Image (tube, rainbow, N blue to C red):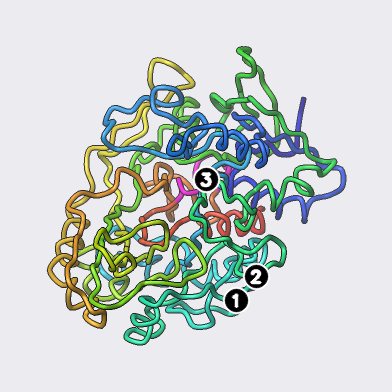
Amino acid sequence: MHYDLIVVGTGFASSFFLKKYLEKAAPTVRVLVLERGEYIPHQQRLQDARSKPLGEVSYVSGGQAGVTYKNNTPEKAWIFDPSFGGSSNCWTGCTPRFMPNDFALKSKYNVGIDWPIQYNDIEPYYCETEDIMAISGPEQTPYPMSKKYPQPAHELSTVDKVLQRAYGELYISQPTARSSISNKRNKCCTSAICHLCPVEAKFTIENGFKKDLYNDSRLEIQYGAQVIQLDIQQNIVKGVQYRLQGKDKQATADLVALGANAIFNAHILLNSGDTNVHTGKNLSEQVGYYGYFDLKDFQNVGGSSIITANGFMLYDGAFRSERAACIIESHNDVFIRYEQGKWRNIAKFKFVFEDIPQAINVVERSTDPVVPQLTYKAHSDYVAKGYNHLKSNIETLFGSLPIENIYLDDKYQPSEAHILGTARMSKDATSGVVDHNLVHHQYRNLLVLGGSSFPTITPSNPSLTIAALSLRAADHLQ
């Protein structure tokens, strides 16, 4: 059958693009959505978790290496959820904006490449996304905002309050899609089970879009449909080929939008014969390290969510010409100090560094047309320099706290659950895969949405920016 639009995937990128597209589209348009996974209702996910022993609850639903992809470097994990709603089912809901200079690393600091858009180009769409997600956030932020957050900020812990007094707007209550008040959703329960969120405080595609967007009469959704490749003729995408219940099928359309993650967007393009030299390269994500701080005669209590604050003290400045920027997360999950009478005299932080994407980290085709293979050889030295600076200056950085001991990870976390790069945005086809509106440079009726379009990898969580870019792409359709 022929459609006006075929969309691949139902995560942040696809769903926010669809929302804007259907708001502007005629009543007669026909849209096909192809979702490789199934629809697993939130209540079923909770019930499945309750039936398992504590500690055996998985963050993913089929996104394991060896099942959906071949991992040539298994020490590097990639976390995602290939089912309806994508990673909105397992994200924590952290939504800080990017900083203005994140879009211009080459111009400002002579590293990486510039994005073909600037902060002001996406700022109105940040506001729109924050309204849709009903974000909780502070009144003062280190990035400019033309509109206040829809919900008030989450409460800070006692440790956070000390650091905020020391650093002002460089240390803020974390902007988050976890409700701080009972409004569109329930208030965050601070149970630290955010990948499932037992009280539905966290925005997901299911609780945000399933009822209205995905019940639009103009839209047809097919579950269990994995797109293998695009049908391209004379640089025009005519449709898609997909596998459903073991059978290969086809559908045609005037416009196609790839909204899978950065692994599968690239793999579909490669299967389709895309010869752009950047397709599949620069597979990236942030690099995170935990740190624990023993506090002297000071209890770390309070805070109304799992991650209470973001610190921007190491985020931006001329130093980025030499070393990676870092965003600091103040964690408020279950942890104690193992000393009698000092159970809460401890603080837990995570230090998340940006990276300069490396062309040696790639998504490639394998012998199986539905299974991509991944090779991730290394982070850049840029990350190591940022970490070494943190390690050398951490006592001074947190000097306002009564610290007895600091324990900083010497090994990074295997994944930040953010899959980025592989089809990056650029001014032209010599430096990237898609243009400033996420349209493929060569195939002009094809959009490549999501984190695969990121030219550089900032310290901030990417989901808010992914959604905002999708709203903007739908708004700028020719």
277 on left or right of 68: left
Callout 2 crowding tier (Cα within 10 Å): few <14, some 14–19, many ≥20: some
Residue tagged 2: 181
Residue tagged 1: 152
Whether residue 326 is visible here, answered yes or no, is: yes
Name the front one of labels 1 and 2: 2
Span of residues in magenta: 439-453
**Marks 1 and 3, how far apart at CA:** 24 Å
**Of pointers 1 and 2, the one earlier in the residue sequence:** 1
The answer to whether marks 1 and 3 mark residues whose Cβ atoms lie closer than 8 Å is no
The amino acid type, in three-letter code, at marker 3 is Cys
Magenta stretch holds residue 281: no
Callout 3 crowding tier (Cα within 10 Å): few <14, some 14–19, many ≥20: many
Name the quarter where the N terminus is drawn.
top right
The answer to whether marks 3 and 2 mark residues whose Cβ atoms lie closer than 8 Å is no
The amino acid type, in three-letter code, at marker 2 is Ile
Along the line of sight, the residue nearer the viewer: 248 or 271: 248
Q: Quadrant of residue 393?
A: bottom left
Q: Quadrant of residue 185?
A: bottom right
